[in-house]
């Protein structure tokens, strides 16, 4: 029986960040926690680093959920929404994101939840991408920003938008232009407008999440006024990979 994480409090989203590039023996230990479906998916990756990172990420997610429910991680049984988003019928709500070897896991007692972390890498033609894919007000923000600030602003917008779509279970299959987010740090609401979805912006919290240097991260949850706290997850057994 695994150690139980303390009870999740309503109105709080708990965040844990770690790393995915770990020694081979830890990857092997992580693989033993995966289901047959997850191992099959891991085997489909062309590049070994992607296979290893997916394996370690899934193992951490299983261990988090196992510790929350007081069960061994390998016994966690995921169910899947129509578009493939995993969930547990009895809760908690959860979502994960990884970029390069960064991993972020978010959990909450309830609600639709999405999280996104992105390595701040060089992006060519930032303004062109924004004009083609972002809402008009978001693209206008980027055009108005000083050139040296555009990359960080781009990732603030991108992570908020992707976190929202992940919370809805859509991923990037839904048009990014169809809704608008506020990238201002500490914005009270975060979701400004939605064109074609039955969502009330006032009920959503969308905002940035602190993360290690060199990345941007954001959270979306369908509860206004939530707070975030570090998740007291113990990764012992998969190595010391915390930041």
Image: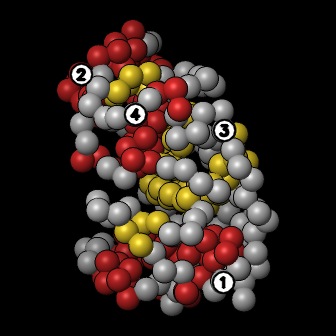
Secondary structure type for disc 1: loop
Which comes before the other along the chain, label 4 or label 2? 2
Q: CA distance from mark 3 to mark 1?
A: 27 Å
Mark 4–mark 2 CB contact (< 8 Å) = no
Mark 1–mark 2 CB contact (< 8 Å) = no
Secondary structure type for disc 4: loop
Residue situated furthest top in the rendering: 144
Instruction: Give the crowd class for mark 3: few <14, some 14-19, many >=20 residues within 10 Å.
Output: some
Q: Which residue is mark 1?
A: 71
Q: CA distance from mark 4 to mark 2?
A: 24 Å
Q: Residue at x 46, y 36 (%)?
A: 160
The answer to which image quadrant residue 147 occupies is top left
Which comes before the other along the chain, label 4 or label 1? 1
Q: CA distance from mark 1 to mark 2?
A: 48 Å
Q: Which residue is mark 4?
A: 199
Q: Residue at x 72, y 66 (%)?
A: 233
Considering depth in this image, is 103 or 204 the residue closer to the camera? 204
Question: Against 153, is 212 above or below?
Answer: below
Instruction: Judge depth for marks 3 and 4 and give the one in front.
Output: 4
x and y percentages locating residue 116 in the rendered image: 47, 47
Instruction: Give the crowd class for mark 4: few <14, some 14-19, many >=20 residues within 10 Å.
Output: some
Q: Which residue is mark 3?
A: 226
Residue situated furthest right in the rendering: 6
Question: Against 20, is 107 above or below?
Answer: above
Which comes before the other along the chain, label 1 or label 2? 1
x and y percentages locating residue 237 in the rendered image: 68, 82
Residue 49 in view: no
């Amino acid at each position: 029986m695994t150690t139980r994480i303390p009870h999740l409090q309503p109105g709080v989203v708990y965040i844990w960040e770690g790393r995915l590039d770990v020694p081979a023996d830890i990857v092997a230990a992580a693989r033993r926690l995966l289901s047959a479906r997850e191992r099959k998916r891991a085997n489909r990756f062309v590049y070994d680093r992607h296979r290893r990172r997916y394996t370690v990420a899934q193992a951490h997610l299983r261990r988090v959920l196992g510790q929350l429910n007081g069960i061994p991680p390998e016994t966690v049984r995921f169910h899947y929404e129509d578009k493939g988003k995993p969930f547990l019928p009895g809760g908690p709500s959860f979502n994960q994101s990884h970029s390069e070897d960064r991993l972020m896991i978010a959990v909450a007692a309830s609600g639709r939840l999405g999280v996104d972390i992105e390595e701040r890498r060089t992006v060519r033609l930032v303004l062109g991408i924004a004009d083609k894919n972002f809402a008009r007000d978001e693209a206008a923000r980027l055009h108005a920003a000083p050139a040296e600030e555009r990359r960080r602003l781009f990732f603030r917008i991108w992570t908020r938008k992707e976190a929202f779509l992940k919370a809805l279970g859509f991923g990037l299959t839904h048009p990014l232009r169809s809704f608008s987010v506020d990238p201002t740090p500490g914005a009270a609401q975060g979701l400004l407008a939605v064109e074609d979805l039955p969502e009330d912006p006032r009920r959503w919290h969308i905002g940035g999440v602190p993360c290690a240097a060199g990345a941007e991260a954001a959270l979306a949850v369908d509860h206004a006024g939530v707070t975030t706290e570090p998740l007291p997850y113990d990764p012992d057994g998969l190595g010391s990979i915390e930041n």
